[in-house]
Amino acid sequence: MRTRLLLLPLCALAGPALAEDIACEGAFAIDSSEARLIEMYGADNVRTEIVPGPEGTEMLATLVFPDSPKRKLMFVWWDEDKRRDPSFIELTAKMVAPGGLRIGLTVAEVEALNGEPFTLLGFGWDYGGAAGFQSGNLADLPGGCVVSLTFSPPDYPVGDDVDSIMGDVEVSSSNPLLAQVGARVESVAIGYPHPDFRD
């Protein structure tokens, strides 16, 4: 009985892993590179290869923890030859991006973080549910990075009443249909403008 009681506090400490807050620095900084990832995570945990891109394309990406679905990070570079200057970095489900963004948030929760409505693309195609921020709290983040999201409903929405949020159209985050279909953040990425277009 005493042994069981002693184990209880240890079990409480071994609960769900805490979320990891990400800043636009270190591995995720504007000047990151494959070399930095190898230095930080170890050569055995970093692999650069061709991965599927949107609309049937392929692209070069550096993967960190490539064989671990829950830990895998994907870095896509502006400078593919030297594998540096991140274009975008896909985060894991346990990571919290600058501004408090994470996988699983509803559209309304993201709108609250931004402090104003934003625009996302309609569902049902390669860029379906994609969203960025032109204004609001999430448009000017420390470190100069930009954040982008992909929203997805749990089931493919059908019916005439949801036609207005399907396909290549812009949808306001304030549209009540987004809550009706239960759209939530499916992926989070941070990135940087092309070096030619930086201040």
Image (cartoon, rainbow, N blue to C red):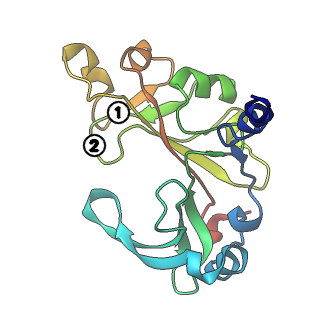
Q: Quadrant of the C terminus?
A: bottom right
What percent of the width, then of the height, locates residue 75?
Answer: 55, 67
29 over 164 or under it: above or below: below
Frontmost residue, 69 versus 180: 69
Pointer 2: what residue?
Answer: 125
Image quadrant assignment for residue 164: top left
Residue at image x 69%, y 54%? 145
Pointer 1: what residue?
Answer: 122
152 over 112 or under it: above or below: below
What percent of the width, then of the height, locates residue 77?
Answer: 55, 72
Q: Quadrant of the N terminus?
A: top right
Residue lying furthest front = 1
The disc labelled 1 sits on which kind of residue? Gly
The disc labelled 2 sits on which kind of residue? Trp
Marks 2/1 in contact by CB < 8 Å: the verdict is: yes
What percent of the width, then of the height, locates residue 16?
Answer: 65, 38
Frontmost residue, 89 versus 115: 89
